[in-house]
Amino acid sequence: MDYVAGFGRRSLEVVGSLGRATQFLFGVLVGVPKPATGFPLLIKQLYSVGVLSLAIVVVSGLFIGMVLALQGYTILSDYGSEAAIGQMIALTLVRELGPVVTALLFAGRAGSALTAEIGLMKATEQLSSMEMMGVDPLRRVIAPRLWAGFIAMPILAMIFSVVGIWGGMLVGVDWLGVFEGSFWGNMQSSVDFVDDVLNGVIKSVVFGFVCAWIAVYQGYDCVPTSAGISSATTKTVVYSSLAVLGLDFVLTAVMFGDF
Amino acid sequence: MVQRTTEIVVGFFMIAGLAALLFLALQVSGLSPKSAAATYTVYANFNDVGGLTPRGKVSMAGVTVGSIESISLDKNTFQAKVTMAIRSDVDTIPADSAAVIRTSGLLGEQYIDISIGGDMESLGEGDTFYSTQSAMNLERLISNFASGR
């Protein structure tokens, strides 16, 4: 009986948490801050969420593109079609690796920081003192961070893809000697702007939204102790990664699954 | 002053994002402003289109002159009807030219090659190729050979 009760309690906790997260999201989206006060806050968050994540995104993009070129070359050169690595790199990056890997890095680099920051604000009762002063913390603290994640993520994903393709070109064309014209030509004839590039951007928009939402919600909902903050930060990274990978499958099936 | 620096850096970040999108559009997906060039439509009926797909290329002497718009089944003749958009500046295709389905390389994609005829009249909007040659089907070729036909 105790097990059944425990299972029931867990289920209620999960459902309650989902409900609070949705209410919270609704509160943030409805409470749009005034442009005059909200814009500088958004800029500041875009800086810490987006610009500061740029380094890790660029470096990983470069290396992933280079590895793709190297692996693709060893396999494709067996069939004498090494000119197709341009197409392979571009499609893999634009459709899948760009949005997904950027989202995973984003969850680790920016999401965890957001959670820890908001969690500490809650633990030191900054959020409640804001409420005492008549400032809505959802508008002042949460909304700029959510929007910053939402805006920064697609930009980071596109930069990741571009840098990855450039890295692939460095290895494929400059090192392994694939003809540059067929590298770009194969890529251009197989990549479609709407079907591949825009669908990749849509994916990254969805991932950015989910990652930012999970991060700010975990921070806002954490137990206000040091242990609570640390478990909330862990949860942010774990939940974001799982959500991104799961959603990626669903989105891929919807976008590219109609054979 | 710190606020201003942040604004400038974020501005550059947004510009980098737009530049990345532009690069993906122009260089990677080959989207060019003149891709919507004027075209005219011609048709060809094939017994077997094999692996031909819409957006595939139509070429003459190896030069791409148009693309495949759609492939549908003609319910009366049970042939495949391929609709092609040919660039308007290529308006001197002889009317008795043949549309041939070829494969680029051994495993490459299939495309339509227009093999030139000798007629003085040329194909215009809405015309249909008189003679066509279907996709080469390796299995059928082998089974024909094995059964001695």
Image: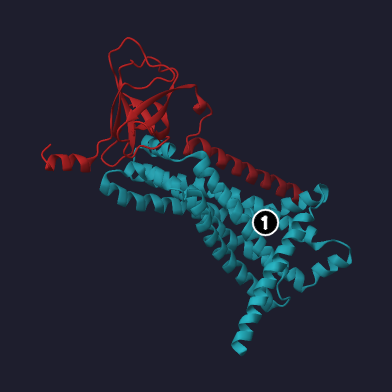
Chain colours: A cyan, B red
- Residue at horizontal 56%, vertical 42%? B20
- Label 1 packing within 10 angstroms: few (<14), some (14-19), many (20+): some
The N terminus of chain A lies in which quarter of the figure? bottom right
- x and y percent of residue A71 in the render? 35, 53
For label 1, the residue is A48
In which quadrant of the rendered view does residue A207 lie? bottom right
Location of residue A112 by image quarter: bottom right
Question: What chain does badge 1 belong to?
Answer: A
Side (left or right) of B27 relative to A145: left
Q: Position of residue A125 (x, y in %)?
A: 80, 72
From the viewer's side, name the closer residue of B108 and A98: B108
Residue furthest to the right in view is A133
Q: Residue at x 21, y 41 (%)?
A: B140
Residue closer to the observer: B100 or A233: B100
Say above or below: B103 vs B127: below
x%, y% of residue A103?
56, 57
